[in-house]
Amino acid sequence: MPPVTQIRIGKHKTGIVDFEKTLKNVANLGRLTDHEIASEMIKQLSKKNYIPPGAYEQYEKAFLNEYKKTYGKALTPKAFGRDRNQGAGSRVREL
């Protein structure tokens, strides 16, 4: 049986199958924008988990938040601003 991780989606705790494995898979993809991280998490996790169509944004925010908590970055309020596609495909380099 695959491992299930409880994470908060909106106001509710939800069990997500293979969440830890997916975090590692996405981290191994290299430097991604917030939008790319959230999209990749949804893409991979929706294969084994039901994600209601009207709740995609809540799941994206929760997945991104957990990703950043795991890898040492806090979720910023602007992570899902007005233009979610702004910067999609671009990569930021830290010096």
Image (cartoon, grey):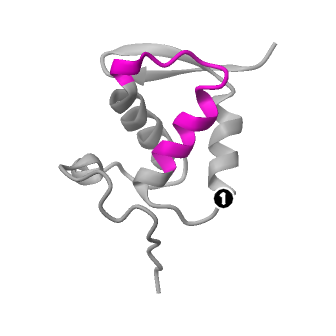
Residue shown at 62%/64% (left/top)? 30
**Residue at image x 55%, y 39%?**
41
Identify which amino acid the numbered label 1 is placed on.
Answer: Leu
Q: Residue at x 41, y 51 (%)?
A: 35
The spot of residue 84 in percent (x, y) is: 29, 51
Counting from the top left corner in percent of width and height, residue 79 is at: 30, 51
SS for dot 1: loop
Foreground residue among 73 and 18: 18
- Please check the rendered image and state whether residue 41 is part of the magenta-colored stretch, yes or no: yes
**Highlighted magenta segment, given as a residue range:** 37-55
Q: Main secondary structure of the magenta part?
A: helix
Quadrant containing the N terminus is: top right
Q: Could you tell me residue 72's position as x and y percent?
A: 48, 55
Badge 1 crowding class, 10 Å Cα cut-off, few under 14, some 14 to 19, many 20 or more, is few
Residue 4 in the image, given as x and y percentages of width and height: 66, 18
Q: Residue at x 47, y 72 (%)?
A: 91
Count of numbered badges drawn on the protein: 1
Q: Is 74 or 35 nearer to us in this picture?
A: 35
Query: Is residue 93 shown left or right of residue 87?
Result: right
Asked if 63 appears above or below 18 in the picture, the reply is below
Q: Is residue 59 toward the left or the right of residue 29 in the image?
A: left
Instruction: Return the residue nearer the eye: 79 or 70.
Output: 79
Residue 78 visible from this viewpoint: yes
User: Image check: 24 left or right of 61?
Assistant: right
Residue assigned mark 1: 29
